[in-house]
Image: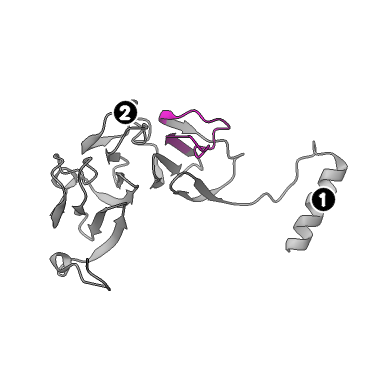
Amino acid sequence: PMVGVHQVTALADSVIIQAEAGWAHMLALDEAGVAYGWGDNSIGQLGLGYKDSPILEVTPIERLRDKGVFFLATGYFHSFTLTDSGMVYGFGSNDHGQLGVYDKFDRDIPVAVPLLSMRNVTHISAGGTHSIVATGNNRVYTFGGNAEGQLGTANFEGKLRPTAVEMENKRIYEVLAGYQFSLILAESCTELPDSLPDKEKDVEVAAMLTAN
């Protein structure tokens, strides 16, 4: 094993604007919108159209060329890309439905996620067996495994297709999928609903004043 920081010399002449690491695979994106992958590809998580593994050389993902890719996301064994035309593509492991394509079959080529494409997706994050998405109109969607409640749907049922998460019309800034948990960065409440009991309202107000 190599110890320390080492340059990826195959990309030395490219201007890399994003690099993402999964469990054992890497994706990178250059300023021209070319996506590259290397490392573990045993489940097709590099989107190369085959499952030869490991991929030791930095390899362009040809099926994403000229698609206008501007964002990459890597999970443990699956990956996503966003394009400037509004398309969302996923590839790799799908044993829990984490690609959001209505089934549990792995994909070794980038496939469009039907319910997310053309939905103004602004951010996507991939976890261990689930995924989470934010859109420009402050919607949050999750899908995939839900053994620990990581989908935020108030139950433990996995989802094969993107499912909306209730966010009470809050502004969404960013979403993050961990191994079996999710985080959402959103604006905080500035007003308390009138339906709260007085004592509960007093506690909340006191907490807000203390925080400020």
Q: How many marks?
A: 2
Relative horizontal placement of residue 88, taking residue 11 as reference (left or right): right
Q: Amino acid at mark 1?
A: Val
Residue 114 colored magenta? Answer: no
User: In the image shown, does 128 or 107 lie closer to the viewer?
Assistant: 128
**Among numbered discs 1 and 2, the one appearing first in the sequence:** 2
- Residue 183: x percent and y percent? 51, 49
Dot 1: what SS?
A: helix
- Residue 45: x percent and y percent? 24, 44
Give neighbour class at mark 1: few <14, some 14-19, many 20+ (Cα, 10 Å): few
Give neighbour class at mark 2: few <14, some 14-19, many 20+ (Cα, 10 Å): some
Magenta part of the chain: 141-161
Q: Amino acid at mark 2?
A: Lys
Residue farthest to the front, as pictured: 1
Q: How is the image coloured?
A: one colour
- Residue 139: x percent and y percent? 50, 39
Residue farthest to the right, as pictured: 198
Q: Is residue 91 above or below residue 173?
A: above
Residue 156 colored magenta? Answer: yes
Q: CA distance from mark 1 to mark 2?
A: 46 Å
Q: Is residue 126 above or below residue 147?
A: below
- Residue 203 is tagged as 1
Dot 2: what SS?
A: loop
- Residue 104 is tagged as 2
Residue shown at 84%/39% (left/top)? 197
- Residue 131: x percent and y percent? 41, 41
